[in-house]
Every structure is written in structure tokens, then in C-alpha cells.
Amino acid sequence: GAVVSQHPSWVICKSGTSVKIECRSLDFQATTMFWYRQFPKQSLMLMATSNEGSKATYEQGVEKDKFLINHASLTLSTLTVTSAHPEDSSFYICSARSGEGGRPSRNEQFFGPGTRLTVL
Amino acid sequence: AQKITQTQPGMFVQEKEAVTLDCTYDTSDQSYGLFWYKQPSSGEMIFLIYQGSYDEQNATEGRYSLNFQKARKSANLVISASQLGDSAMYFCAMRSGTYKYIFGTGTRLKVLA
């Protein structure tokens, strides 16, 4: 299957600082990338959908000014957590979608390994 | 509204036994896809198996099979011959309409030696 990487794999920062997380599709062009947040012992919650060259679409309740998403190329999307606070500590996972087909299929979306953010 | 329900927060199974993890879904779309993922403690999401709404046969991938009952809107995962390495969190997910995935709350499986 296709490979999606995330960097960094973990980060610890002080409250009030900003943190950037990168999501890269290594061997395919991703028309769409998704960002999820997962709190301990909980499910993945979709935060936003980003398409290359356009503004991200945020899910209800997600602050777009706090979680800045940039999808500058077909292989790179970044999530910046601005002015991070302890409640932003979480596991952030990206996924990348290949292809333009409308019907669901087996090989359509690939997940990165995740980034664990701890805000002190 | 689209929804995925996993009613088993935790399951135990004896090594080498089979186990079924339940998943029910709700969607008004005719075309949709159902996925199962395994998430070990490392956090990575490992794709296990996929079932399309138009697929007539139940999906199988090695020791994993999907018991797809469309009329009942259920897509249960069956793991045969459980191994200690199968201990992990398992998520059922659905994609319909848009490209977004909706995840269930997950089932934590513990395989006992």
C-alpha cells in the first residue's frame, strides 16, 4: 500500500507556543488529506479536510484559527496548533486520499503513523 | 444521519480461538464502504479489511473475514485463530457520500495465552 509519513512522531512543548505537524504522501499524489485527533482511549475524530491549493474545511466545533491547515502541494499538508494549551495534548493522525473516483474502494485512503503532542 | 456503532468496549479471547467484533452502521446512501482497522499501542492505524456495499461476497483477508449483513446493517469482523499479537484496539469505519470516514468508538481486544 501507499505510504504516508508524519513528522514529528512526538513533540513536547510549553503552553503558548505553536507546533507544526507535517503529513506527507511519499509515493503518491494526495488530492485530499484529512486530519484527525484522538484522545486517550477514544476514537478518531475528524478535525478537517484539506484539498491541495484550497482552504481546509473544518468540522463543527473545531477552531480554524487555532488549528491552521495548509495543503501546499499534492504531497504535503501541515497542521499548526497555535498557542497550544494542555487541553490540546492529543494524538494527531493524518490520512491521505489518492485518486478521484467517487465510489468507495479498498485502496483509497492511507493513514500516517500519528504525532503525539504533549503541551506542558 | 451517518453513524457507526461498536457496542463492545472490550473483549477477551483465548489464543487460537476465533472472535467476533461487532459493528453496525447507519446510512441512507446506496453506495458506501466499510473498513476495519487495528490500532496497536503504537497508535498507527493498520488497515485490515474492506467491504463495499455492492460486494456480494463477504470480504476475507487471511485470518480476517467480514460478516456483512446488509439488511441488518451490520459488518462484524471475525478473527480466526487469534494470536497474542492481535491484542489491540479495533475500529470499524464507514465512508459514504463524501470522502470522510466515520469511526466507531472501538473495541479493545485482549488475547489470552
Image (tube, grey):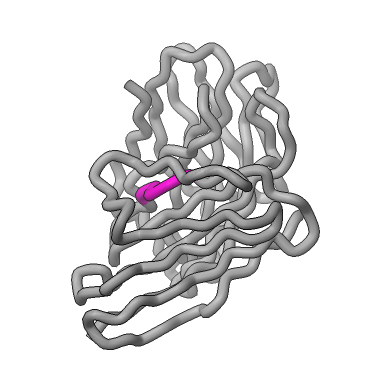
Residue B48 picture location, percent across and down: 61, 49
Tell me what residue is drawn at x 28 percent, y 39 percent. Answer: A60
Residue A21 picture location, percent across and down: 49, 71
Q: Is residue B100 above or below residue B9?
A: above
Residue A118 picture location, percent across and down: 31, 80
Q: Is residue A71 above or below residue A60?
A: below
* Residue B16 in sight from this viewpoint: no
Tell me what residue is drawn at x 68 percent, y 56 percent. Answer: A73
Total number of numbered labels? Answer: 0
Given residues B89 and A79, the one toward you in this image is: A79
Given residues B27 and A3, the one toward you in this image is: A3
* Residue B25 in sight from this viewpoint: yes
State left or right for residue A36 relative to residue A76: left
B103 drawn magenta: no
Tell me what residue is drawn at x 38 percent, y 22 percent. Answer: B26
Main secondary structure along the magenta-highlighted residues? strand
Q: Is residue A29 above or below residue B4?
A: below
Based on the displayed image, in which of its 4 quarters is residue B7 positioned? top left
Q: Is residue B87 above or below residue B106?
A: below
Tell me what residue is drawn at x 51 percent, y 41 percent. Answer: B77
What segment is highlighted magenta in the picture?
A45-49
State left or right for residue A37 relative to residue B76: left
Given residues B113 and A78, the one toward you in this image is: A78
Q: Could you tell me which quadrant the N terminus of chain B lies in?
A: top left
